[in-house]
């Protein structure tokens, strides 16, 4: 009789423990489809345009920068920028990727942010109408992204979008700084 009680208790303990492992797996963060999110955000940017940006216009897409380390962009910033480029292209715009300086805007004497003359000249030389700039910040559970479409002539923000993506295994890998190879 004692053996049956022990066996019954072992089965109950196993059932409880296996239930805990299922709960643990249930709480794991899953990745969003970054491509889908990027395309949706470009649709949102296009719908949010505060002034006309005709289809066929050249839009320059700058790599998203990591707000924690402004001088660098990691895989996350580069792949999201590429997806944004593809989404603008599919929406009928000409696109061009450009590695612009991290501090794309500088303050003038009046303290107003504006494109430096050298950057504005380079963008005008290629016939660009707008530039898409953005940044991201990895958090504990999410990566926070901020996008802006800036009209080159007026230097006004003509559309913006802010969003977050869950810090699943793929996002975590993309925001992690690669380690130099060991010697």
Image: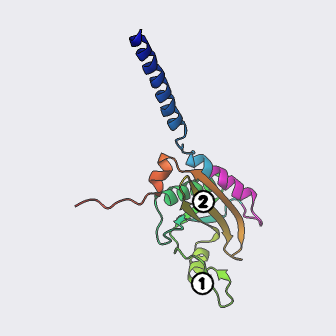
Label whose residue precedes the other's in the sequence (1 or 2): 1
Q: Is residue 138 left or right of residue 5?
A: right
- Look at 54% across and 56% down and name the residue there: 80
The quarter holding residue 59 reads bottom right
Q: Nearer the viewer, residue 132 or 34?
A: 34
| Residue 131 magenta | no
- Secondary structure of the residue carrying numbered label 1: helix
Q: Position of residue 28 (x, y in %)?
A: 52, 41
Q: Is residue 21 above or below residue 161?
A: above
**Decide: marks 1, 2 in contact (CB < 8 A)?**
no
Between marks 1 and 2 in the image, the one whose residue lies nearer the viewer: 2
Q: Residue at x 50, y 37 (%)?
A: 24
The residue indicated by pointer 1 is 117
Spot the residue most to the left.
183
Vertical position of residue 74 compared to residue 151: above or below: above
- Residue 37 or residue 180, whichever sits in front: 180
Question: x, y percentage for residue 20?
Answer: 50, 32
Element type at mark 2: strand
Residue 45 circle label: none
Magenta residues span 39-54
Residue 27, located in which quarter of the rendered image? top right
Given the current orientation, which residue lies at the most extreme front position?
2
Residue 13 vs residue 76, the one in the foreground: 13
Q: Residue at x 48, y 21 (%)?
A: 12
- What residue sits right under mark 2 in the picture? 145
Which image quarter holds the N terminus?
A: top left
Q: Residue at x 46, y 24 (%)?
A: 13
């Amino acid at each position: 009789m004692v053996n049956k009680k022990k066996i019954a208790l072992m089965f109950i303990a196993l059932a409880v423990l296996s239930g805990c492992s299922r709960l643990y797996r249930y709480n794991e963060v899953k990745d969003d489809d970054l491509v889908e999110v990027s395309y949706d955000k470009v649709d949102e940017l296009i719908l949010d345009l505060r002034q006309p940006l005709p289809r066929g216009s050249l839009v320059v897409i700058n790599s998203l920068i990591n707000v924690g380390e402004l001088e660098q962009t990691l895989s996350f910033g580069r792949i999201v920028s590429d997806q944004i480029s593809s989404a603008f292209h599919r929406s009928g715009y000409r696109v061009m990727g450009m590695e612009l300086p991290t501090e794309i805007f500088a303050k003038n004497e009046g303290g107003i942010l504006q494109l430096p003359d050298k950057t504005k000249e380079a963008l005008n030389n290629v016939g660009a109408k707008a530039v898409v700039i953005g940044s991201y910040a990895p958090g504990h559970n999410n990566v926070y992204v901020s996008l802006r479409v800036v009209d080159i002539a007026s230097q006004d923000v003509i559309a913006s979008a802010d969003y977050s993506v869950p810090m699943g295994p793929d996002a975590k890998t993309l925001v992690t700084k690669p380690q130099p190879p060991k010697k």
